[in-house]
Image: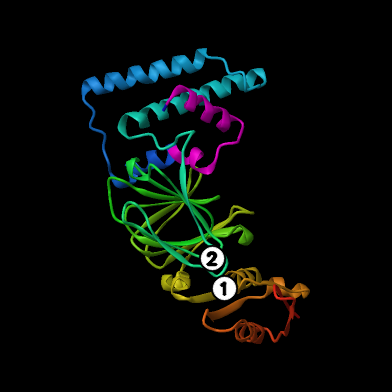
Amino acid sequence: MKPSEFKYLINRYLNQEAKNHERELIDVWYKSFDEEGEKLNLSYQQEQNLKKEMYDQVKHTWHTPSKNIKLFPVLKYVAAAATICFVTFICFHKYVSQPAVSVHENYVYINTETREVKKVELPDGSAVWLNANSRLRISDNFQKKQQRYVYLDEGEAFFSVKKNPKRPFIVFTQSVSTRVLGTSFNINSYKALHKATVTVATGRVRVSIQAKVLGILTPDLQINYSTQSGNYQVYKCDASQAHSWTTGQSILNNASFEEVALTIKNVYGVLLTSPNKAAIHYKYNLHINTTHTLDETMKIICSVHQNTFKRRNNNEIIIY
């Protein structure tokens, strides 16, 4: 990593402007060695070179004033200490694997619209199904990096990951990161739902939030993380239902009104609302088939709590 790039990240980190993947880069890499049992086999000369590089970087950082950071006197020392630790990890990472973050990173973007489900093949042979109204991106240097980073910025995706123990596969959302080697799993991270849900179909994944590991998931386990409260729970489930949307079905279990409304928006492109205050407490167990008409689906939804519905224009349906 270039000194200019490093100082850029440090400034963002200290100013609490760093993105999720920038904050988690070092922690994800560090934990991967302990979890997978990887070892560093450095020669004596390599160790000496590594120590020298660390010292040079720390010395450079300590003696180079930053014009962009204004701290109280006491906090300056705290910031300097944190910077030294961060530099040490950056240098260590640089010596054993290729840097994963670049300030001038270019990305390939994959988007879906309403009523659109898209399957894409990643450069490593992994497959991704992207649900409606979702956004995914990968670096244009995806194949050259030591670890395979994928960013689900919005929406839902089902991943079938090509196994490669030497290149871990990590999916970042706005709240959680999910690390795998070779497996299949579903991630639902629509902002409107204020939560992130990870469900494992095959293999094993680790779900984290910043430096905290929330859980290790195996097949038919699901984790729900609230982006509002920070609370999370792990459930036993039928994983096939979590990604049923990839085959034109939407199976909802104990779903909230917001989840039903989001499904209707994704499948039919209309807004579902209700003036009934009790609706926010409704729970639904539904099987929505995309081959059904909107009216057919709405009759099924309304039968759960004995509601009625009416259309407003062509873009909104109101439940009473």
What amino acid type is highlighted by mark number 1? Val
In screen coordinates, is 195 left or right of 201?
Answer: right
> Which residue is drawn at the image coordinates 21% and 25% (left, top)?
43
Residue bearing the label numbered 1: 267
Label 1 environment density (alpha carbons within 10 Å; few <14, some 14–19, many ≥20)? many
Is residue 12 in the magenta section? yes
x and y, in percent, of residue 16 in the image: 60, 35
x and y, in percent, of residue 260 in the image: 61, 73
Say which element carries label 1. Answer: helix
Q: State the quadrant of the N terminus.
A: top left
What amino acid type is highlighted by mark number 2? Ala
When asked about the image quadrant of residue 115, the answer is: bottom right
- Along the viewing direction, whichever of 29 and 287 lies nearer the viewer: 287
Residue bearing the label numbered 2: 132
Is residue 13 in the magenta section? yes
In screen coordinates, is 299 left or right of 209?
Answer: right
| Magenta stretch bounds | 2-25
Q: Real-space Cα distance between discs 1 and 2?
A: 8 Å
Total labels: the figure holds 2
Reply above or below: 293 against 66.
below
- Main SS, magenta residues: helix
When asked about the image quadrant of residue 46, the answer is: top left
> Which residue is drawn at the image coordinates 55% and 84% (left, top)?
292
Give the mark, 1 or 2, whose residue is nearer the N terminus.
2
- Along the viewing direction, whichever of 107 and 175 lies nearer the viewer: 107
Say which element carries label 2. Answer: loop
x and y, in percent, of residue 28 in the image: 42, 42
The reply to whether dot 1 and dot 2 touch (C-beta < 8 Å) is yes
